[in-house]
């Protein structure tokens, strides 16, 4: 099970940001300020990941990627562009971390002898209970 180390400094340099006007209800200030932040990251062109890591990212993040393999995330939670940038960077690294996690292999186990016996006893008890509900056969 490979453990991936993130080279955050290298990856951070490869991120590109764009400030956009945030959507929503208008106001005196809304048409002058671009507080929404859009982060884009090209997975294929990244130098911060090995080829194996890139493959894993492309598979795991497939629904979030464009046809060119570019990840685009937007954030307009805050009215501050700087705060939105911080939020989106944190969200990006969490997304990458979860995409690179390799799940632990499941080890198949057999039920214990006592649990099998307990299950069969319960089934027999239910069967007897239902059999006793029937009308008696007088033949």
Image: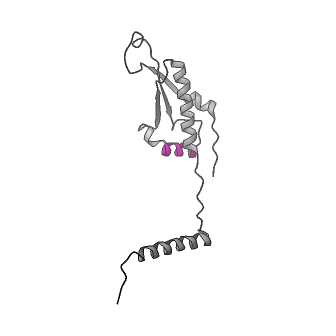
User: On screen, 123 above or below 41?
Assistant: below
User: On screen, 110 above or below 41?
Assistant: below
Q: Residue furthest bottom?
A: 139
| Residue plotted at (38% across, 21% down) | 24
Residue 16 image point, x, y percent: 51, 26
Q: How is the image coloured?
A: one colour
| Residue plotted at (62% across, 32% down) | 8
Image quadrant of residue 9? Answer: top right
- Taken as a whole, is the magenta stretch helix, strand or loop? helix
| Residue plotted at (55% across, 28% down) | 89
Magenta stretch, residue numbers: 48-60
| Residue plotted at (45% across, 16% down) | 34
Q: Residue furthest top?
A: 28
Residue 47 image point, x, y percent: 58, 35
User: On screen, 23 above or below 103?
Assistant: above
Image quadrant of residue 15? Answer: top right
Please give left or right for residue 20 compared with residue 84 in the image.
left
Residue 55: say if magenta.
Answer: yes
Residue 121: say if magenta.
Answer: no
Q: How many marks?
A: 0
Quadrant of the rendering where the C terminus is positioned: bottom left
Residue 56 image point, x, y percent: 53, 46
Residue 30 image point, x, y percent: 41, 14
Out of 84 and 129, give the one closest to the viewer.
129
User: On screen, 31 above or below 113?
Assistant: above
């Amino acid at each position: 099970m490979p453990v991936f180390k993130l080279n955050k400094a290298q990856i951070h340099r490869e991120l590109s940001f764009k400030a956009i006007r945030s959507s929503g209800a208008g106001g005196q200030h809304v048409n002058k300020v671009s507080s929404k932040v859009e982060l884009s990251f090209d997975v294929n062109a990244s130098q911060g990941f090995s080829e194996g890591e890139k493959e894993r990212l492309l598979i795991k993040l497939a629904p979030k990627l464009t046809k060119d393999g570019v990840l685009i995330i937007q954030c307009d939670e805050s009215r501050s562009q700087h705060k939105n940038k911080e939020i989106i960077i944190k969200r990006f690294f969490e997304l990458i971390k979860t995409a690179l996690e390799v799940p632990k292999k499941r080890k198949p186990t057999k039920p214990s002898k006592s649990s099998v016996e307990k299950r069969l006893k319960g089934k027999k008890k239910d069967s007897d209970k239902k059999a006793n509900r029937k009308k008696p056969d007088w033949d």
